[in-house]
Image: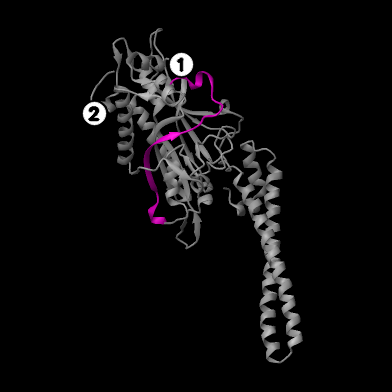
Amino acid sequence: MIQLQYIKEHRDECIERLKIKNVADVEQRIDEIIALDEKRRAIQKDSDAIKAEQNAIAKEIGMLFKQGRRDEAETKKARTAELKADEKRMGEEMAAVEQELNAKLISLPNTPHISVPRGKSADDNLEVGRFGTMPELPADALPHWDLCAKYDIVDFELGNKVTGAGFPFYKGKGARLQRALINFFLNEATNAGYVEIQPPLMVNEASGLGTGQLPDKEGQMYAIPLDGFYMIPTAEVPITNIYRGEIVSADQFPIRHVGYSECFRREAGSYGKDVRGLNRLHEFSKVEIVVIEHPDRSYERLEEMKHHVGGLLDKLGLPYRILKLCGGDISFTSAMTFDFEVWSAAQKRWLEVSSVSNFEAFQANRMKLRFKDSDGKMRLCHTLNGSALALPRIVAALLENNQTPDGITMPECLRPYLGFDKI
């Protein structure tokens, strides 16, 4: 949530930055927020005046009774009753205004960093780097869904039978490959200084609100209404919410965590070639890195996280590119995001495998995650997260790019985890 003070003190700047995200009716929305805050302050001022008058009258009534001036005291008591009624009315009015103000603040996306490029969609994202060697495959190379069937390592039809589309079964060496990747990613992160967390797979509403997944406008989260829980779309949600409502010490920075979890996304509206095979699933495995940092160093930490993700792809031998997302493609909560895409040689297309983002104080403001600075002033932390990495498209690219006439060769870095060199 954008800080209200920033909106009030930097109205024009806030509007211009939100225009980079193509926010509709942004001037009207910002002015409505400012007007509601002014109304809230006016009510508070009147309410304070009423309380002050009540306190003064209470003292007067005591004096009047002591002096035997009962009629005057009764008149004052009648006035007190009127003031209490006014106070109750103002309290109800204040609650309604605060509810409306909060709803408008929560519905407003994060302001993008000043360097985020303008654009309407993914077509306008800026490529900032390309790494690795593109594999050359024969004309009869198979896409990963055919390789999965050929070697019986991922069963999509069985997933359809037991659950539905987007919930595959991993079998034999396919299951072993999943486990190897998870362990490899976790070990690489812990070696880099991240503390491992194994989070729950469900969160409550307050946690979803804290990291910005709720309100869920696109209906992408799986909800469990009976218990008021939501299946997590990423381990970012429970891990970041560890610190909801906390005041951390400045000497703890950077706070680094890594966690593996299953992730659940409805992916409403997805269809066509982009969803075939492992390209887009409703349940998938992912290792996530989360950082809580001092505001002055969060962009330095973002670069460190990018380097970590790139190092994983280098070790896996997968060619990849890094994209700086434009305003039209960046998420609701993010101030700056870099996507990592690997080249899928058989599909001849780029597949997104990681997003590394800095949310600045947006999530921390929603969660009331703060720290005390060296000058004793309470400030909001900055939060960051990144996929390191999401498994399905990594598996797809590994299968396709490393296929040979006699099997699929596994990267050197995974062989100690796998116990085999080839599928």
Q: Amino acid at mark 1?
A: Lys
Local crowd size for mark 1, using a 10 Å CA cut-off: few (<14), some (14–19), many (≥20): few
Closer to the camera in the image, 196 or 209: 209
Q: Find residue 115 and report its horizontal and vertical position in percent.
A: 56, 38
Which residue appears at 61% of the width and 52% of the height?
A: 6
Quarter occupied by residue 96: bottom right
Residue 300 visible in the picture: no
Q: Which mark is residue 282?
A: none
Residue 299 painted magenta: no
- Above or below: residue 173 compared with residue 72: above
- Badge 2 crowding class, 10 Å Cα cut-off, few under 14, some 14 to 19, many 20 or more, is few
Residue 423, percent across and down? Answer: 29, 18
Residue that mark 2 sits on:
416
Q: On the rendered structure, is 119 left or right of 162?
A: right
Judging depth in this view, the residue of 295 and 144 nearest the camera is 144
Q: Is residue 52 visible?
A: yes
The kind of secondary structure element at disc 2 is: helix
Q: Residue at x 70, y 80 (%)?
A: 57
Give yes or no for contact between labels 2 and 1 (Cβ–Cβ under 8 Å).
no
Location of residue 100 in the rendering, given as x and y in whole percent from the top left corner: 66, 51
Stretch in magenta = 249-277
Residue indicated by mark 1: 348
| Number of numbered markers | 2
Whichever of labels 2 and 1 marks the residue nearer the N terminus, that label is 1
Residue type at mark 2 is Pro
In the image, residue 275 lies in the stretch drawn in magenta: yes
85 displayed left or right of 321: right
